[in-house]
Image (cartoon, rainbow, N blue to C red):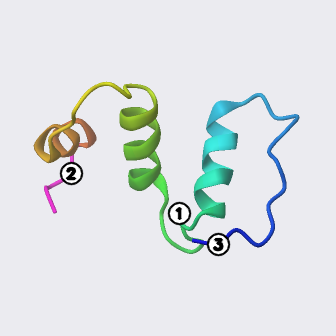
Amino acid sequence: MKVVSNTPLVGESDLTKVTKTFLYQIGYLSKGADPEIPFRIFFDFFLKHPTKAWMVEEIANELKVSKP
Protein backbone atom coordinates (compact mmCIF):
# COMPACT_ATOMS: atom_id res chain seq x y z
CA MET A 1 0.00 0.00 0.00
CA LYS A 2 1.28 3.45 -0.86
CA VAL A 3 -0.21 6.60 0.66
CA VAL A 4 -0.05 9.36 -1.92
CA SER A 5 -1.80 12.08 0.06
CA ASN A 6 -3.52 12.21 3.41
CA THR A 7 -5.02 15.04 5.41
CA PRO A 8 -4.78 14.41 9.15
CA LEU A 9 -8.13 14.08 10.92
CA VAL A 10 -7.50 16.83 13.45
CA GLY A 11 -10.13 19.03 15.01
CA GLU A 12 -12.77 16.31 15.11
CA SER A 13 -13.54 14.80 18.49
CA ASP A 14 -16.40 12.48 17.44
CA LEU A 15 -14.82 9.01 17.26
CA THR A 16 -17.65 7.68 15.08
CA LYS A 17 -17.12 10.39 12.43
CA VAL A 18 -13.33 10.00 12.50
CA THR A 19 -13.57 6.23 12.18
CA LYS A 20 -16.06 6.39 9.31
CA THR A 21 -13.92 8.96 7.44
CA PHE A 22 -10.80 6.83 7.94
CA LEU A 23 -12.57 3.68 6.72
CA TYR A 24 -13.69 5.49 3.55
CA GLN A 25 -10.15 6.83 3.02
CA ILE A 26 -8.60 3.36 3.14
CA GLY A 27 -11.32 1.79 0.99
CA TYR A 28 -12.85 -0.43 3.69
CA LEU A 29 -16.16 1.39 3.14
CA SER A 30 -17.19 2.28 -0.39
CA LYS A 31 -19.54 4.95 -1.65
CA GLY A 32 -22.83 3.63 -2.97
CA ALA A 33 -22.92 0.59 -0.68
CA ASP A 34 -24.66 0.41 2.69
CA PRO A 35 -21.85 0.96 5.22
CA GLU A 36 -23.79 -0.10 8.34
CA ILE A 37 -22.65 -3.73 8.71
CA PRO A 38 -18.95 -3.31 7.81
CA PHE A 39 -18.75 -0.15 9.94
CA ARG A 40 -20.36 -1.84 12.94
CA ILE A 41 -18.03 -4.84 12.62
CA PHE A 42 -14.97 -2.59 12.70
CA PHE A 43 -16.23 -0.04 15.24
CA ASP A 44 -18.48 -1.98 17.63
CA PHE A 45 -16.42 -5.15 17.76
CA PHE A 46 -12.78 -4.49 16.92
CA LEU A 47 -12.32 -0.92 18.18
CA LYS A 48 -14.48 -1.16 21.29
CA HIS A 49 -13.18 -4.61 22.28
CA PRO A 50 -9.62 -4.87 20.90
CA THR A 51 -8.52 -7.71 23.18
CA LYS A 52 -11.46 -10.02 22.45
CA ALA A 53 -11.14 -12.73 19.82
CA TRP A 54 -14.43 -12.70 17.92
CA MET A 55 -15.86 -15.78 16.23
CA VAL A 56 -17.80 -15.21 13.00
CA GLU A 57 -20.86 -16.78 14.62
CA GLU A 58 -20.72 -14.28 17.51
CA ILE A 59 -20.53 -11.29 15.18
CA ALA A 60 -23.35 -12.61 12.98
CA ASN A 61 -25.51 -13.25 16.05
CA GLU A 62 -24.87 -9.78 17.52
CA LEU A 63 -25.66 -8.12 14.18
CA LYS A 64 -28.68 -10.40 13.62
CA VAL A 65 -27.46 -11.43 10.17
CA SER A 66 -26.61 -14.78 8.60
CA LYS A 67 -23.04 -16.03 8.56
CA PRO A 68 -21.27 -15.44 5.22
Mark 2 or mark 1, which has the lower sequence index?
1
Left or right for 23, reference 35: right
Q: Residue furthest right?
A: 11
Q: How many marks?
A: 3
Magenta-highlighted residues: 64-68
Residue at 23% of width from left, 36% of height from top?
A: 62
Q: Residue visible at 49% across and 58% down?
A: 35
User: In the displayed structure, would residue 62 be above or below residue 35?
Assistant: above
Separation of residues labelled 2 and 1 (CA atoms): 18 Å
Of marks 1 and 3, the one in the foreground: 3
| Amino acid found under the numbered disc labelled 2 | Val
**Residue placed at 21% from the left, 36% from the top?**
54
- Element at badge 2? loop
**Residue type at mark 1?**
Leu
Secondary structure beneath label 3: loop
Q: Amino acid at mark 3?
A: Lys
3D distance between C-alphas at marks 2 and 3: 34 Å
Quadrant containing the N terminus in the rendered view: bottom right
Camera-side residue: 47 or 30? Answer: 47
Residue wearing tag 1: 29
- Tag on residue 15? none
In front: mark 2 or mark 1?
Answer: 1
Which residue is label 3 attached to?
Answer: 2
**Which image quadrant for residue 7?**
bottom right
Magenta span main SS: loop
**Of label 2 and label 3, which has the lower sequence position?**
3
Tag 2–tag 3 contact (CB < 8 Å): no
Residue named by callout 2: 65
Q: Secondary structure at mark 1?
A: loop
